[in-house]
Image (spheres, rainbow, N blue to C red):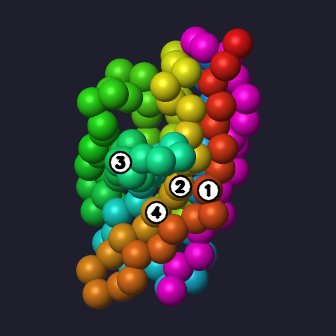
Amino acid sequence: QVQLVESGGGLVQPGGSLRLSCVASGNIFRLYTMGWYRQVPGKQRELVATIFSGGGNTNYADSVKGRFTISSDRTKNTVYLQMNNLKPEDTAVYYCTYMAPAQLSSWGQGTQVTVSS
């Protein structure tokens, strides 16, 4: 099992920036995908961005392309989400996830991001 701890959420004004971090620990496979999802009350959790450990391939939701950047530091087992030009509709609880073949997926506890003036 892999444990995930997120940090970096908070309150920011529209147009501002935040960086989320997620540290993974435990039985981490060599090849895995880590990423970020977000959820608002009453709606399904949705993909924000993912990154693959094998080659750094990334995937983004259309709504965040050009504004968010996902990156990782494998030496620290950490994945980051740099969020720029934040909009009120980005307000949500952001969850880090770890996925690997033949392993149960793991989720973090979530971190609140609020974009408001």
Which comes before the other along the chain, label 3 or label 4?
3
Secondary structure, mark 4, is strand
Which comes before the other along the chain, label 1 or label 4?
4
Residue 23 lies in magenta, yes or no? no
Secondary structure, mark 2, is strand
Q: Nearer the viewer, mark 3 or mark 4?
A: 3
Q: Name the quadrant containing residue 6.
A: bottom right
Q: CA distance from mark 2 to mark 4?
A: 6 Å
Chain part drawn in magenta: 1-15
- Quickly name the residue at label 2: 95
Residue 71 higher or lower than 96, as above or below: above
- Quickly name the residue at label 4: 97
Which comes before the other along the chain, label 2 or label 3?
3
Q: Nearer the viewer, mark 1 or mark 4?
A: 1
Residue under the point 47% across and 79% down: 28
Q: CA distance from mark 2 to mark 3?
A: 10 Å
Residue lying furthest front: 42
Tags 2 and 4 in contact by the CB under 8 Å rule?
A: yes
